[in-house]
Image (cartoon, rainbow, N blue to C red):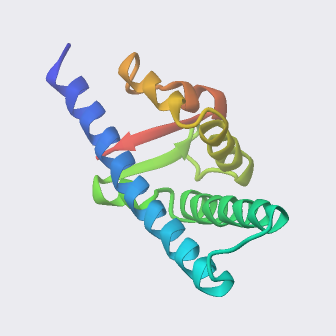
């Protein structure tokens, strides 16, 4: 195992932790706001609608950042870019594939970076690559 391989994994994990903290903060803000507006009481239908709203907010933030900036907040901090295999910015389709794979697997798919840090399972399935400066 080379030092370059270890640094690659550390940067990817640090970026992921940073993104979890940022997106988690956004979720907490909207949960706090909903708690204030509903006084902490929601019907089952309202709760399901609120969860769908939270997922759509996260989806919008992720897709807009990776499609138009080619990076998330955590990737910016660690000087990483997310590109298509041909070097172009991600399409909305590729960003949606990445988002829903992670959402559907509850993030377990990220464990694949330990086996091949330069081409994890999520990158293989979405046709993308992470470039590190």
Quarter in which the N terminus is drawn:
top left
Residue at coordinates 80% horizontally, 61% vertically from top-left? 44
- Relative to 16, say whether 5 is above or below: above
- Residue 53 located left or right of residue 66: right
- Relative to 88, say whether 105 is above or below: above
In front here: 84 or 44?
44
Identity of the residue furthest to the top in this view = 1
The image quarter in which residue 102 lies: top right
- Residue 82 located left or right of residue 102: left
Residue at coordinates 74% horizontally, 47% vertically from top-left? 93
Image position, residue 111 (x, y; %): 44, 25
Q: How many marks?
A: 0
- Residue 120 located left or right of residue 91: left
Image position, residue 26 (x, y; %): 50, 70
Residue at coordinates 51% horizontally, 57% vertically from top-left? 70
- Residue 9 located left or right of residue 69: left
In front here: 57 or 93?
57
Image position, residue 104 (x, y; %): 67, 36
- Relative to 64, say whether 108 is above or below: above
């Amino acid at each position: 195992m080379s030092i370059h391989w270890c640094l690659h994994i550390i940067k990817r994990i640090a970026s992921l932790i940073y993104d979890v903290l940022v997106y988690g903060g956004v979720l907490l803000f909207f949960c706090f706001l909903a708690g204030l507006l509903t006084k902490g009481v929601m019907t089952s239908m309202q709760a399901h609608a609120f969860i769908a709203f939270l997922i759509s907010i996260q989806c919008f933030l992720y897709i807009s950042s990776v499609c138009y900036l080619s990076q998330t907040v955590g990737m910016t901090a660690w000087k990483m870019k997310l590109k298509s295999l041909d070097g172009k910015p991600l399409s909305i389709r590729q960003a949606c594939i990445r988002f829903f794979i992670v959402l559907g697997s509850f993030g377990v798919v990220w464990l694949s970076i330990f086996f091949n840090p330069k081409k994890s399972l999520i990158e293989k399935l979405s046709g993308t690559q992470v470039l590190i400066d």
